[in-house]
Image (tube, rainbow, N blue to C red):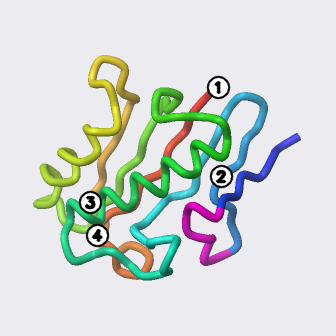
Amino acid sequence: MKKIIQTDHAPAPIGPYNQAVLKGNMLYTSGQIAIDPKTGNLVTDDIKAETKMVMENMKAVLSEAGMTFENVLKSSIFISDMNNFSAINEVYATYFNEETAPARETVEVANLPKFVNVEISMIASL
């Protein structure tokens, strides 16, 4: 049976989905964007601050499931402008040990929810 993961320390879903679903020992997260869960405001003035907010939201979801970034097997990063790749990668890298970092893809897309610049989803395992 699947278990729905929900925390107030990450933004509430803005559609018919959940923050994450745990099935057995596998966690599948929905994409996180830079909504500050305390204020409900978007953090989009600076790409590094935006990426940090996304990663902090993801950290909260992982934590609610009893996991950390060390449990992440795969990340998917969607960005609206590949010119932001280096800045996003710089912040993203601070959350992982390079030797045990997860598999990942980074894809440039035409648009993201609320017209943010970056969205990240993850798959993790206990």
Residue at mark 1 to residue at mark 4: CA–CA distance: 30 Å
Q: Which mark is residue 108?
A: 3
Residue type at mark 3 is Glu
Q: Quadrant of residue 8?
A: bottom right
* Secondary structure of the residue carrying numbered label 2: strand
Horizontally, is 23 left or right of 77 in the view?
A: right
Residue type at mark 1 is Leu
* Secondary structure of the residue carrying numbered label 1: loop
Q: Earlier in the sequence, mark 2 or mark 4?
A: 2
Q: Residue 20 carries which label?
A: 2
Q: Earlier in the sequence, mark 1 or mark 2?
A: 2
Task: Give the residue displayed 34% in from the left and 32% down from the top.
Answer: 96
Horizontally, is 26 left or right of 48 in the view?
A: right
Residue type at mark 2 is Ala
* Residue 124, horizontal then vertical, whole percent: 57, 34
Mark 4 lies on residue: 117
Instruction: For label 3, count other residues whose C-alpha is less than 10 Å away and answer few (under 14), some (14-19) or many (20+).
Output: some
* Secondary structure of the residue carrying numbered label 4: loop
Highlighted magenta segment, given as a residue range: 8-15
Residue type at mark 4 is Asn
Q: Which of marks 3 and 1 is nearer the N terminus?
A: 3
Answer whether labels 1 and 4 touch (C-beta < 8 Å).
no
Instruction: For label 2, count other residues whose C-alpha is less than 10 Å away and answer few (under 14), some (14-19) or many (20+).
Output: many
- Closer mark to the observer between disc 3 and disc 2: 2
The N terminus lies in which quarter of the figure? top right
Q: Residue 69 carries which label?
A: none
